Image: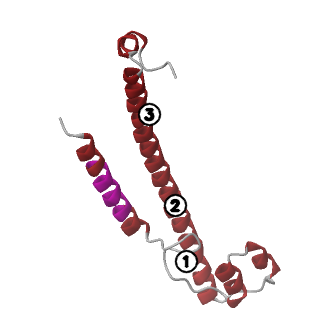
Amino acid sequence: MPTTQARVNTRDRELKEQIIDLAKRARLDGWNEFVEELKVPSELTTALVTNRPELIRLAQPRPLTAEEAKALYTLIGALLETNTALREHAECVSIMVRNWSGAINGLFGVARRISRFAEFRHADAAAEGEDDD
């Protein structure tokens, strides 16, 4: 049976691999980054660079050239892809936290057993289970 330290090392290695894999797949460098470099009409640049959507509402609607329309379609696709990447990132973080919580709960179980043993309650613990704290 692997030692506790070996299990911790294995989990740590798996976590590192998971983080590296996610970073490669997500193509995100931060919360306000897009998955690809985008060209947008000049009226939208400030809003996107500063991450202030209210500035987009100030842009005056106007007829778009075919090139600008294509840029907007590309932007919408990149926004959807970036949103998906951020959701996947958040889901992975959630899973990592749940795994971490499980490990912490396991350590609390060990601490409770040691405490019961130190108080000479080890015979009672087998009858009661782990739920007395």
| Residue lying at 51% horizontally and 83% vertically, measured from the top left | 37
Residue 20 magenta-drawn? yes
Q: Which mark is residue 84?
A: 2
Q: Which mark is residue 85?
A: none
Three-letter amino acid code of the residue under disc 1: Thr
Instruction: Place residue 22 in its image quadrant.
Output: bottom left
Q: Earlier in the sequence, mark 3 or mark 2?
A: 2
Placement of 32 over or under 102, stated as above or below: below
Placement of 85 over or under 9, stated as above or below: below
Label 3 vs label 2, nearer the camera: 3
Secondary structure at numbered mark 2: helix
Number of residues whose C-alpha sits closer than 10 Å to that of mark 3, classed few (under 14), some (14–19) or many (20 or more):
few
Label 3 vs label 1, nearer the camera: 3
Instruction: Place residue 66 in its image quadrant.
Output: bottom right
Per the picture, the main secondary structure of the magenta-coloured stretch is helix
Residue 39 x %, y %: 57, 86
In the picture of the structure, the residue carrying the numbered disc 3 is: 108
Secondary structure at numbered mark 1: helix
Placement of 63 over or under 110, stated as above or below: below
Three-letter amino acid code of the residue under disc 2: Thr
Q: Which mark is residue 74?
A: 1
| Residue lying at 47% horizontally and 71% vertically, measured from the top left | 28
Instruction: Please give the range of residues in magenta.
Output: 10-21
